[in-house]
Each structure stands twice: as structure tokens, then as C-alpha cells.
Amino acid sequence: MGLGIGGVLEQLIGPPGGLIFLALLGLALMSRHHRLGRSLAFTGFGLLYVASLPVTAMVLLSSLEPANALTAQDLAAADNSPQAIVVLGAGRRYAPELGQETVNGAALQRVRYAAWLAKRTGLPLLATGGLAHDSNPAEAVLMQQVLAREFAVPVRWVESESRTTYENAKFTAKILKSEGIDRVYLVTHALHMKRSLMSFAKFGLTAIPAPTAYEGRGWKIGVRSFLPRAEALFLVDQVFHEWVGMAWYWMRY
């Protein structure tokens, strides 16, 4: 998905914004159109409740997250021979304790796993992510800094122009193909992997999933799975974002 108006529309349509709006619309209509208003309000509040359940988040996450993470056997497999590692940016934040911009928590999860993978395989690393603003560097540069300073892992290539996952793939392919590289480990959140693979395949790169930060693995089915939680609603919103992103890429590209 792009930025700006598209992002605002997504927030208005998807959970929780769209469901709250639907419920409020129903309440507003009840005085003149009681049956319709009651139906809309009931539907909006009901869907909001369902979207807030951990069991809903678990089911929806299973539609996106790869079933398996990389194993030592995968890394050692003879037919599994990537030429590089690509790590996707996930955002930035200003760290007052450091007095500077740095990667956010989600990006740090990806960077940490990319560093582990680079040390385990000895493969060169490419960081991709743009969105530089004011005098602050792009996300890929921030990742390069963290990898070098905190994990002692050098970054060979920095792709700093992309604004979306689709552009991550497009500009990364241009860099790597110029060096004869067409097979990579792709590091991103497990939730984000399906859309990322879809994008990289579009530009002729064979991307082997190297997912990290699984969200659906730690929860167990029980009584609390059917009690609303803010964390579950956040994850359902993230799933919705991925679905919208994949639909947008399919229609536009």
C-alpha cells in the first residue's frame, strides 16, 4: 500500500476504526430507522468484540505466517544456497536516551535475526528501507548503523530509496542482479512474509523465507482466548493491513 490517503482510508475501513464507525452509524440511525440502526450497531459492536479476541488473532495469523522457521538443517541443505541476506526495514523512532534517531522495536527484531543469520552463514547483507526525512537518514542507514555498532555485522549494500515493500523488492533486485545475485534469504516479520515474497518474486529474485518475530505461536487456546485483549485487536489490524497490501499489489502491479 502507498502512503497518505490510502493509509487513512485503510484505518477508516479496517479494525477498529471501521467497526466503531459502523456501530456509531447504527446508533445515529436508530431514532428514525430503528431496525436498520439496531442491525448496524449490533454488527459493528459484535465484529469489534470478535476482532478483539486472541482466538481470532491466532486464526488469522495462521493464514499469513509461515508454518516453519529456518532450522540448522535448512541452512546446511545442499539445495539451499542463497548468495546474500536481505533485511527489510520496519520503522524508526527518536531515542531521547541516545539523543538520535534509531530503528524502532520491530526493525530491531529483524536486524537482530539478520545479524544472527549473517554470522551463521557468512553471507553478505543488504539492508533496505527509505523514508528519510529532514536531516535524518533513511531506515536502511539506521539499520546499517545498528548492525555495525551493536552486532558487529557489516552491511555490504544499502538501499535507501524505497517507501513500500514493493519498492523494497524493486530496488533491491536492481542492486543485487547487477552483481549476479538472484537468490537470497529474506528477513522480515513472519506476519509480513507472504506479501514480501509476493513482491520479490515479481522482480525475479528467489527469496527463501527467513521469518522472525512470530506472533501467533505463544498463545494457547483457553478461556482467556475468548476474552477481549488490546493486543489481539492490534494483531487483527496488522493482518488486515497485510491483506489490503496484497490486494493492492495484485490490482496495481
Image (cartoon, helix red, strand yellow):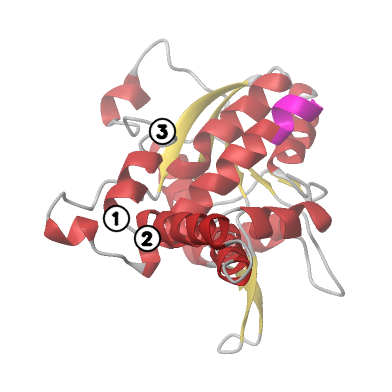
Residue to which mark 3 is pinned: 63
Label 2 neighbourhood size at 10 Å, few (<14), some (14-19), many (20+)? Answer: some
Q: Disc 2 vs disc 3: which is toward the camera?
A: 2
Element assignment for label 3: loop
Question: On the rendered structure, is 51 left or right of 26?
Answer: left
Numbered-mark total: 3
Q: Which mark is residue 49?
A: 2
* Magenta stretch secondary structure, dominant: helix
The Cα–Cα distance between marks 2 and 3, rounded to whole angstroms, is 20 Å
> In the image, is residue 59 part of the stretch drawn in magenta?
no
Q: Amino acid at mark 1?
A: Pro
Nearest the camera: 90 or 32?
Answer: 32
Who comes first in sequence, dot 2 or dot 3?
2
From the top left corner, tell me how far across and down residue 41 is, in percent: 50, 62
Who comes first in sequence, dot 2 or dot 1?
2
Q: Which mark is residue 20?
A: none
From the top left corner, tell me how far across and down residue 20 is, in percent: 55, 66
Quadrant including the C terminus: top right
Residue 54 in the image: above or below residue 210? below
Identify the residue at image location x=76%, y=60%: 138
Q: Disc 2 vs disc 1: which is toward the camera?
A: 2
Residue to which mark 1 is pinned: 54
- Magenta residues span 248-253
